[in-house]
Image: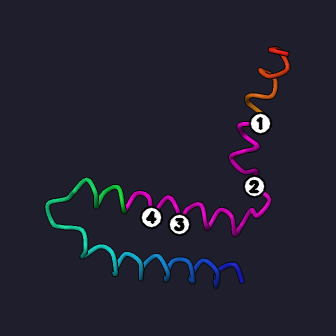
Amino acid sequence: MKLLAIAAITLLLYMMMLFDWPKIKRHQRREKAAFAAITVFGWGLAVLLIFFPDIHGPSQLIDAIFKPLGKTLE
């Protein structure tokens, strides 16, 4: 079941790349590199969430960092 979800996400991202990649002009190499990097990063996060759905979010990380600081400032 998890492999089916990964395949669906991969297919969706592949279709997105096929649709958006030609719209980026040939000489815009940085934009293409950024688009590819963000897409691969998003795919990785999606796969990670499929295997580990209880991963803590970014707000919990910020809480863990700044909660002790807030207690010392009180």
| Type of the residue with mark 2 | Ile
x and y percentages locating residue 23 in the rendered image: 25, 74
Q: CA distance from mark 4 to mark 1?
A: 28 Å
Are circles 4 and 1 on residues that touch, CB within 8 Å? Answer: no
The magenta segment = 36-63
What is the C-alpha distance between the residues marked 1 and 3?
26 Å
* Image-quadrant location for residue 6: bottom right
Cα distance in 3D space between marks 3 and 4: 6 Å
Give the image quarter of residue 7.
Answer: bottom right
Tag 1 and tag 2, C-beta contact below 8 Å: no
Q: How many numbered discs, if any?
A: 4
Distance between the Cα atoms at labels 1 and 2? 15 Å
| Three-letter code for the amino acid on which mark 1 is drawn | Asp
Q: Earlier in the sequence, mark 1 or mark 3?
A: 3
Mark 1 element type: helix
Residue 43: which numbered mark, if any?
3
Q: Main secondary structure of the magenta part?
A: helix
